[in-house]
Amino acid sequence: MADGCEMKMQGGFIRNLIVIFVPLLVFACAPRAEFHTIPQKGAKRTGTYPRFSEKPQAETGQFSEEERARLVRELEGDAQRLRGSDHLR
């Protein structure tokens, strides 16, 4: 007889634990105000995606094609001079 009574007490204890802890777990996992992100400048969900086939335009001034060609020639000349000297050997 004592075994049946103990089982009822254990069943009630377990049921009480479930009734107490399940709502606590649910509320603990619910999102709260401190987990919301702050909207950032430029971060907008517009539904558009970047196209990687288009060359992006830089916001800063870039070298023109003439300046680029001049710099490439200078660097190639410097490399030739260095290859002819003992610096790279």
Image (cartoon, helix red, strand yellow):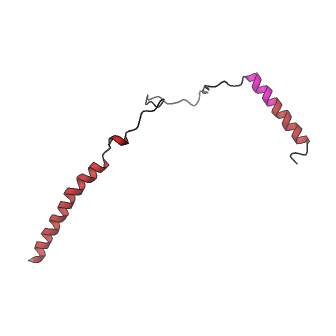
Q: Left or right of 63: which side holds 38?
A: left
The residue lying at 88 percent from left, 41 percent from top is: 83
**81 up-or-down from 6: above or below:** above
Dividing the picture into quadrants, the one containing residue 87 is top right
Residue located at (84% from left, 38% from top): 79
Q: Which residue lies at the image location 86% right of the left edge and 33% below the top edge?
A: 77
- Asked if 69 appears above or below 83 in the picture, the reply is above
Instruction: Examine the rendered structure and indicate whether residue 19 appears above or below residue 10.
Output: above
Q: Nearer the viewer, residue 60 or 81?
A: 60
Region in magenta: 60-72
- Residue 40: percent from left, percent from top: 45, 32
- Name the chief secondary structure element in magenta: helix
Residue toward you, 10 or 20:
20
The quadrant in which residue 33 appears is: top left
Q: Quadrant of residue 72?
A: top right
Against 86, residue 59 (above or below) is above
